[in-house]
Image: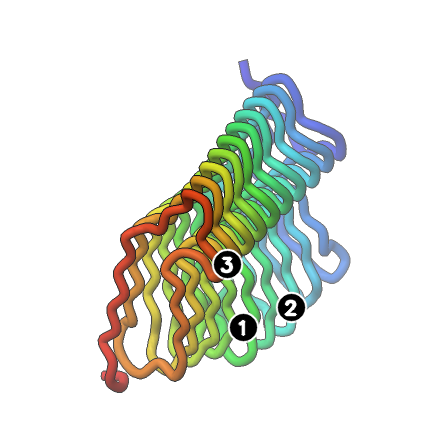
Amino acid sequence: MSKRVPFTPGDLANRQWGTDDILSGDLATTILIGDAGGSLFDFSRGGNDTFTENEPSTYTFYGDAVGSMFNFTRGGDDTFTTGLSSSTTTAYGDAGGDLSDHSKGGNDTFSSERSRQVDNTFYGDAGGNMLGHAQGGDDTFLTSTAQGATHTFYGDAGGEMSDHSKGGNDTFQGSRQATNTFFGDAGSNMSGHAQGGDDSFTSRTDSLNIFYGDAGGDMSDHSKGGNDTFTGSFFSTATFFGDAGGNMSDHAQGGDDLYTDSGGEIPSKTLYGDAGGDLSGFAKGGNDTFTSTGGGPG
Protein backbone atom coordinates (compact mmCIF):
# COMPACT_ATOMS: atom_id res chain seq x y z
CA MET A 1 0.00 0.00 0.00
CA SER A 2 1.28 3.47 -0.88
CA LYS A 3 2.12 5.87 1.93
CA ARG A 4 1.84 9.63 1.40
CA VAL A 5 4.93 11.42 2.69
CA PRO A 6 6.00 15.10 2.77
CA PHE A 7 9.15 16.40 1.10
CA THR A 8 12.34 14.58 2.06
CA PRO A 9 15.92 15.78 1.46
CA GLY A 10 16.80 12.13 0.78
CA ASP A 11 15.23 9.46 -1.45
CA LEU A 12 11.73 8.11 -1.89
CA ALA A 13 11.67 4.31 -1.94
CA ASN A 14 9.40 1.29 -1.66
CA ARG A 15 5.86 2.61 -2.21
CA GLN A 16 6.27 6.07 -0.75
CA TRP A 17 4.20 8.72 -2.50
CA GLY A 18 4.94 12.42 -2.24
CA THR A 19 2.22 14.79 -1.11
CA ASP A 20 0.57 17.36 -3.40
CA ASP A 21 2.31 20.62 -2.49
CA ILE A 22 1.99 24.30 -3.42
CA LEU A 23 5.46 25.84 -3.65
CA SER A 24 6.20 29.53 -4.16
CA GLY A 25 9.60 31.05 -4.87
CA ASP A 26 10.99 34.42 -3.80
CA LEU A 27 14.39 36.06 -3.35
CA ALA A 28 15.08 33.90 -0.29
CA THR A 29 13.81 30.63 -1.81
CA THR A 30 15.02 30.14 -5.37
CA ILE A 31 15.41 26.33 -5.47
CA LEU A 32 12.13 24.45 -5.09
CA ILE A 33 11.78 20.65 -5.00
CA GLY A 34 8.47 18.85 -5.20
CA ASP A 35 9.22 15.56 -3.47
CA ALA A 36 12.80 14.29 -3.03
CA GLY A 37 16.16 16.00 -2.74
CA GLY A 38 17.65 12.66 -3.77
CA SER A 39 16.20 10.08 -6.16
CA LEU A 40 13.09 7.91 -6.59
CA PHE A 41 13.41 4.12 -6.27
CA ASP A 42 11.23 1.00 -6.34
CA PHE A 43 7.51 1.85 -6.77
CA SER A 44 7.67 5.33 -5.26
CA ARG A 45 5.97 8.22 -6.97
CA GLY A 46 5.92 11.99 -6.87
CA GLY A 47 2.98 14.14 -5.89
CA ASN A 48 1.06 16.61 -8.05
CA ASP A 49 2.88 19.81 -7.15
CA THR A 50 2.40 23.46 -8.14
CA PHE A 51 5.32 25.90 -8.56
CA THR A 52 5.01 29.69 -8.88
CA GLU A 53 7.24 32.77 -8.59
CA ASN A 54 6.66 35.91 -6.53
CA GLU A 55 9.73 38.06 -7.21
CA PRO A 56 12.12 38.45 -10.16
CA SER A 57 15.12 36.18 -9.62
CA THR A 58 16.93 33.08 -10.89
CA TYR A 59 14.95 29.95 -10.08
CA THR A 60 15.43 26.19 -10.33
CA PHE A 61 12.40 23.90 -9.97
CA TYR A 62 12.41 20.08 -9.66
CA GLY A 63 8.99 18.56 -10.08
CA ASP A 64 9.78 15.30 -8.29
CA ALA A 65 13.48 14.49 -7.70
CA VAL A 66 16.76 16.38 -7.88
CA GLY A 67 18.48 13.10 -8.72
CA SER A 68 17.20 10.28 -10.95
CA MET A 69 14.21 7.96 -11.23
CA PHE A 70 14.75 4.19 -11.22
CA ASN A 71 12.82 0.91 -11.20
CA PHE A 72 9.03 1.42 -11.52
CA THR A 73 8.84 4.95 -10.17
CA ARG A 74 6.42 7.52 -11.50
CA GLY A 75 6.52 11.30 -11.57
CA GLY A 76 3.60 13.45 -10.51
CA ASP A 77 1.52 15.72 -12.72
CA ASP A 78 3.18 19.02 -11.84
CA THR A 79 2.41 22.62 -12.84
CA PHE A 80 5.11 25.28 -13.28
CA THR A 81 4.09 28.92 -13.76
CA THR A 82 6.57 31.71 -14.48
CA GLY A 83 5.32 35.21 -15.15
CA LEU A 84 7.81 37.72 -13.85
CA SER A 85 9.94 39.97 -16.04
CA SER A 86 13.75 39.78 -15.84
CA SER A 87 13.70 36.26 -14.35
CA THR A 88 15.67 33.17 -15.34
CA THR A 89 13.98 29.82 -14.70
CA THR A 90 15.11 26.23 -15.16
CA ALA A 91 12.37 23.67 -14.50
CA TYR A 92 12.60 19.87 -14.55
CA GLY A 93 9.22 18.21 -14.89
CA ASP A 94 10.29 15.05 -13.08
CA ALA A 95 14.03 14.44 -12.47
CA GLY A 96 17.11 16.60 -12.65
CA GLY A 97 19.07 13.46 -13.60
CA ASP A 98 18.00 10.38 -15.58
CA LEU A 99 14.91 8.26 -16.07
CA SER A 100 15.80 4.56 -16.32
CA ASP A 101 14.39 1.04 -15.95
CA HIS A 102 10.55 1.26 -16.16
CA SER A 103 10.23 4.76 -14.69
CA LYS A 104 7.63 7.08 -16.14
CA GLY A 105 7.39 10.85 -16.17
CA GLY A 106 4.23 12.69 -15.19
CA ASN A 107 2.00 14.81 -17.41
CA ASP A 108 3.42 18.21 -16.54
CA THR A 109 2.41 21.74 -17.54
CA PHE A 110 4.89 24.59 -18.04
CA SER A 111 3.53 28.10 -18.50
CA SER A 112 5.26 31.47 -18.92
CA GLU A 113 3.07 34.53 -19.41
CA ARG A 114 2.85 38.32 -19.41
CA SER A 115 6.55 38.93 -18.87
CA ARG A 116 9.51 40.55 -20.65
CA GLN A 117 13.20 39.78 -20.88
CA VAL A 118 12.88 36.28 -19.38
CA ASP A 119 15.02 33.21 -19.97
CA ASN A 120 13.25 29.87 -19.50
CA THR A 121 14.64 26.34 -19.89
CA PHE A 122 12.02 23.62 -19.46
CA TYR A 123 12.69 19.85 -19.34
CA GLY A 124 9.52 17.82 -19.68
CA ASP A 125 10.83 14.76 -17.86
CA ALA A 126 14.62 14.33 -17.34
CA GLY A 127 17.41 16.84 -17.31
CA GLY A 128 19.77 13.99 -18.20
CA ASN A 129 19.13 10.81 -20.19
CA MET A 130 16.32 8.32 -20.68
CA LEU A 131 17.26 4.65 -20.91
CA GLY A 132 15.92 1.17 -20.29
CA HIS A 133 12.14 1.18 -20.77
CA ALA A 134 11.68 4.69 -19.37
CA GLN A 135 8.77 6.66 -20.74
CA GLY A 136 8.18 10.39 -20.87
CA GLY A 137 4.90 11.98 -19.89
CA ASP A 138 2.53 13.91 -22.14
CA ASP A 139 3.71 17.41 -21.27
CA THR A 140 2.39 20.86 -22.21
CA PHE A 141 4.62 23.91 -22.76
CA LEU A 142 2.79 27.23 -23.21
CA THR A 143 4.52 30.60 -23.42
CA SER A 144 3.05 34.01 -24.18
CA THR A 145 5.79 36.41 -23.15
CA ALA A 146 6.96 39.47 -25.10
CA GLN A 147 10.02 41.55 -25.99
CA GLY A 148 13.25 39.69 -25.78
CA ALA A 149 12.34 36.39 -24.14
CA THR A 150 14.35 33.21 -24.70
CA HIS A 151 12.67 29.81 -24.30
CA THR A 152 14.30 26.39 -24.62
CA PHE A 153 12.02 23.36 -24.44
CA TYR A 154 13.03 19.69 -24.08
CA GLY A 155 9.98 17.48 -24.45
CA ASP A 156 11.46 14.50 -22.64
CA ALA A 157 15.25 14.34 -22.04
CA GLY A 158 17.88 17.04 -22.03
CA GLY A 159 20.48 14.42 -22.95
CA GLU A 160 20.17 11.11 -24.82
CA MET A 161 17.43 8.55 -25.31
CA SER A 162 18.56 4.93 -25.67
CA ASP A 163 17.48 1.30 -25.22
CA HIS A 164 13.66 1.08 -25.38
CA SER A 165 12.91 4.51 -23.95
CA LYS A 166 9.94 6.35 -25.36
CA GLY A 167 9.05 10.01 -25.52
CA GLY A 168 5.65 11.38 -24.57
CA ASN A 169 3.17 13.14 -26.85
CA ASP A 170 4.03 16.73 -25.99
CA THR A 171 2.49 20.08 -26.94
CA PHE A 172 4.64 23.20 -27.41
CA GLN A 173 3.73 26.85 -28.01
CA GLY A 174 6.46 29.46 -28.41
CA SER A 175 6.17 33.18 -27.73
CA ARG A 176 6.02 36.19 -30.00
CA GLN A 177 9.03 38.54 -30.07
CA ALA A 178 11.14 35.69 -28.65
CA THR A 179 13.76 33.11 -29.50
CA ASN A 180 12.21 29.66 -29.15
CA THR A 181 14.16 26.39 -29.41
CA PHE A 182 12.15 23.18 -29.36
CA PHE A 183 13.49 19.64 -28.86
CA GLY A 184 10.58 17.27 -29.25
CA ASP A 185 12.17 14.38 -27.37
CA ALA A 186 15.98 14.35 -26.80
CA GLY A 187 18.35 17.28 -26.66
CA SER A 188 21.18 15.02 -27.84
CA ASN A 189 21.13 11.59 -29.57
CA MET A 190 18.66 8.74 -29.94
CA SER A 191 19.93 5.16 -30.20
CA GLY A 192 18.90 1.56 -29.55
CA HIS A 193 15.14 1.20 -30.00
CA ALA A 194 14.34 4.64 -28.59
CA GLN A 195 11.19 6.16 -29.98
CA GLY A 196 10.08 9.76 -30.17
CA GLY A 197 6.56 10.85 -29.28
CA ASP A 198 3.96 12.42 -31.55
CA ASP A 199 4.54 16.07 -30.70
CA SER A 200 2.82 19.31 -31.69
CA PHE A 201 4.75 22.60 -32.12
CA THR A 202 3.31 26.07 -32.70
CA SER A 203 5.25 29.31 -33.17
CA ARG A 204 3.87 32.84 -32.90
CA THR A 205 4.33 36.07 -34.81
CA ASP A 206 7.62 37.99 -34.93
CA SER A 207 9.79 35.23 -33.47
CA LEU A 208 12.90 33.16 -34.18
CA ASN A 209 12.24 29.42 -33.98
CA ILE A 210 14.35 26.28 -34.22
CA PHE A 211 12.46 22.97 -34.21
CA TYR A 212 13.96 19.51 -33.69
CA GLY A 213 11.14 17.03 -34.04
CA ASP A 214 12.87 14.26 -32.11
CA ALA A 215 16.66 14.53 -31.49
CA GLY A 216 18.92 17.55 -31.43
CA GLY A 217 21.83 15.26 -32.34
CA ASP A 218 22.01 11.95 -34.22
CA MET A 219 19.62 9.03 -34.61
CA SER A 220 21.18 5.56 -34.90
CA ASP A 221 20.50 1.82 -34.44
CA HIS A 222 16.72 1.20 -34.60
CA SER A 223 15.61 4.54 -33.16
CA LYS A 224 12.43 5.97 -34.58
CA GLY A 225 11.06 9.49 -34.83
CA GLY A 226 7.50 10.40 -33.93
CA ASN A 227 4.81 11.80 -36.23
CA ASP A 228 5.15 15.48 -35.39
CA THR A 229 3.10 18.54 -36.38
CA PHE A 230 4.67 21.99 -36.81
CA THR A 231 2.78 25.22 -37.35
CA GLY A 232 4.70 28.35 -38.36
CA SER A 233 3.58 31.95 -38.07
CA PHE A 234 3.86 35.18 -40.06
CA PHE A 235 6.83 37.57 -39.70
CA SER A 236 8.82 34.73 -38.11
CA THR A 237 11.96 32.78 -38.95
CA ALA A 238 11.86 28.99 -38.78
CA THR A 239 14.53 26.30 -39.02
CA PHE A 240 12.88 22.90 -38.98
CA PHE A 241 14.42 19.44 -38.55
CA GLY A 242 11.69 16.84 -38.82
CA ASP A 243 13.60 14.19 -36.87
CA ALA A 244 17.34 14.73 -36.18
CA GLY A 245 19.48 17.83 -36.16
CA GLY A 246 22.51 15.65 -36.99
CA ASN A 247 22.78 12.38 -38.91
CA MET A 248 20.57 9.31 -39.26
CA SER A 249 22.33 5.95 -39.61
CA ASP A 250 21.91 2.18 -39.24
CA HIS A 251 18.16 1.37 -39.23
CA ALA A 252 16.95 4.69 -37.85
CA GLN A 253 13.60 5.80 -39.19
CA GLY A 254 12.04 9.22 -39.46
CA GLY A 255 8.45 9.98 -38.57
CA ASP A 256 5.66 11.22 -40.84
CA ASP A 257 5.83 14.93 -40.08
CA LEU A 258 3.60 17.82 -41.09
CA TYR A 259 4.86 21.40 -41.44
CA THR A 260 2.38 24.21 -42.16
CA ASP A 261 2.77 27.98 -42.23
CA SER A 262 -0.28 29.29 -40.40
CA GLY A 263 -0.64 32.26 -42.73
CA GLY A 264 1.27 35.36 -43.66
CA GLU A 265 4.79 36.08 -44.72
CA ILE A 266 7.73 34.26 -43.16
CA PRO A 267 11.02 36.12 -43.72
CA SER A 268 13.13 32.96 -43.70
CA LYS A 269 12.50 29.26 -43.41
CA THR A 270 14.87 26.32 -43.72
CA LEU A 271 13.23 22.91 -43.73
CA TYR A 272 14.85 19.48 -43.32
CA GLY A 273 12.33 16.69 -43.56
CA ASP A 274 14.35 14.14 -41.59
CA ALA A 275 18.02 14.87 -40.79
CA GLY A 276 20.05 18.05 -40.86
CA GLY A 277 23.08 15.93 -41.79
CA ASP A 278 23.35 12.63 -43.69
CA LEU A 279 21.25 9.49 -44.04
CA SER A 280 23.42 6.37 -44.19
CA GLY A 281 23.19 2.61 -43.80
CA PHE A 282 19.55 1.51 -43.84
CA ALA A 283 18.22 4.76 -42.39
CA LYS A 284 14.87 5.76 -43.78
CA GLY A 285 13.09 9.10 -43.89
CA GLY A 286 9.43 9.57 -43.09
CA ASN A 287 6.59 10.68 -45.36
CA ASP A 288 6.63 14.40 -44.66
CA THR A 289 4.32 17.17 -45.84
CA PHE A 290 5.23 20.86 -46.20
CA THR A 291 2.57 23.51 -46.83
CA SER A 292 2.98 27.29 -47.05
CA THR A 293 -0.02 29.61 -47.32
CA GLY A 294 2.09 32.69 -48.18
CA GLY A 295 0.93 36.29 -48.24
CA GLY A 296 0.69 38.83 -45.45
CA PRO A 297 -1.22 38.60 -42.20
CA GLY A 298 -4.97 38.85 -42.43
Q: Mark 2 points at which residue?
A: 87
> Judging from the image, what secondary structure is the residue with disc 1 in?
strand
Q: Distance between the residues labelled 2 and 1?
A: 9 Å
Is residue 85 left or right of 31 when viewed as pictured? left
Q: Residues within 10 Å of mark 1 (few under 14, many from 20)?
A: some
> Judging from the image, what secondary structure is the residue with disc 2 in?
loop
Please name the residue shown 50% across and 47% down the image: 219
Tell me whether circle 2 and circle 1 mark residues in contact (CB < 8 Å): yes
Q: Distance between the residues labelled 3 and 1?
A: 30 Å
Measuring from the top left, give residue 246's x and y in whole percent: 52, 57
**In front: 32, or 162?**
162
Residue placed furthest toward the front: 281
The numbered mark at residue 115 is 1
Tell me whether circle 3 and circle 1 mark residues in contact (CB < 8 Å): no
Is residue 235 left or right of 26 when viewed as pictured? left
Q: How far apart are marks 3 and 2 (CA)?
A: 29 Å
Please name the residue shown 59% across and 63% down the image: 120
Measuring from the top left, give residue 221's x and y in whole percent: 50, 38
- For marks 3 and 1, give the one nearer the viewer: 3
The kind of residue on which mark 2 rests is Ser
The kind of residue on which mark 3 rests is Gly
In this view of the protein, can residue 107 be seen by the observer? Answer: yes
* Residue 272: quadrant of the picture: bottom left
* Colour setup of the view: rainbow
